[in-house]
Amino acid sequence: MPQLGFGVWQVPDAEATPAVAEALKAGYRSIDTAAAYGNEAGTGAAIAQSGVDRDDVFVTTKLWNDDHGYDNTLRAFDESLKKLKLDVLDLYLIHWPTPARDNYVDTWKAFVELQKEGRVRAIGVSNFQPAHLQRLIDETGVVPAVNQIELHPYLQQGEVRAFHAEHGIQTEAWSPLGQGGELLSDPVVTKIALAHGKSPAQVVLRWHLQIGNVVIPKSVTPSRIRENIDVFDFSLASDEIAALSTLDRGGRIGPDPDELN
Ligand code: NAD
């Protein structure tokens, strides 16, 4: 799985095609979509038209909350693949645990079956808390390859990352740029950016990469799409990583996974 990919949340289907095309042209080889984003078709069209070899692109999509349950999952997976125009998916994620519905274990059993059938290469989850991960492991014995969670310098998710490290689960950061808000003008970030002649977004992405996160920044602006992948020609010193790591406020932008249903 490439450590840096392109996210398409809040990109309308018709706009997803030029945005993903631009990302592939800029060198991204991993695309993160979801059934709930309503842009799997536009994303698939861009991949098909790009001229990039299918095997060179890592495609992730996610199962929406209303499709939890064993049979529903198998049906929803078929629909996603059809919209993406793919025979095999690279990574399928359970979008949210929706604990009040209490059926993510059945959903996970369907994911395991899809992987056994060779229809998806890797299976994982998103927005799972340690208790949800532990339950999947206890009840199925199958550890998710990835947990995609909200993560940026203002929300560093120490407890979840420690659980991932203990169980060999890859941490993937959603909203890695804090959705382009206050974080990108934080004085700690801008000072480091100035020192490297890089942008605040590039510094934040570099922090993620150096602490081992997979990142999927989103933009529909071609110059920013290019900027966000131009992060492999510099590195942050350990004191700069440490300074960014002091910014944790523990505050979410998105919903609390224990509450969303
Ligand atoms: P992000 O942190 O990637 O921020 C994107 C926003 O930041 C853009 O809309 C733009 O306003 C700004 N931006 C982007 N590049 C910039 C740059 N170089 N300079 C200045 N501003 C810049 O936020 P996101 O879109 O919420 O998250 C990224 C991806 O994560 C999504 O597209 C989606 O694929 C995924 N995601 C997953 C979940 C989940 O529940 N699994 C939830 C949210 C997002």
Image (spheres, rainbow, N blue to C red):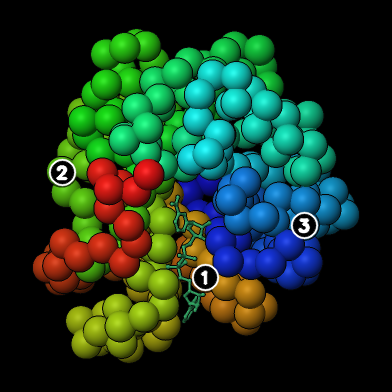
Q: Residue sitting at 37 percent across and 11 percent down? A: 140
Between 248 and 244, the residue placed more toward the observer is 248
Question: The disc labelled 1 sits on which kind of residue?
Answer: Asn
The span from disc 3 to disc 1 (Cα, nearest Å) is 21 Å
For the residues carrying marks 3 and 1, which lies nearer the camera in this image? 3
Question: The disc labelled 2 sits on which kind of residue?
Answer: Glu
The span from disc 2 to disc 3 (Cα, nearest Å) is 36 Å
Task: Identify the residue under disc 3.
Answer: 42
Q: Position of residue 28 (x, y in %)?
A: 63, 57
Q: Is residue 55 visible?
A: no
Task: Identify the residue under disc 2.
Answer: 159
Between 8 and 171, the residue placed more toward the observer is 8
Residue 137 picture quarter: top left
Q: Is residue 57 above or below residue 109?
A: below
Q: Residue sitting at 16 percent across and 62 percent down? A: 250
Residue 147 picture quarter: top left
Q: Position of residue 236 (x, y in %)?
A: 29, 67
Disc marking residue 228: 1
For the residues carrying marks 2 and 3, which lies nearer the camera in this image? 3
Q: Is residue 135 above or below residue 161?
A: above
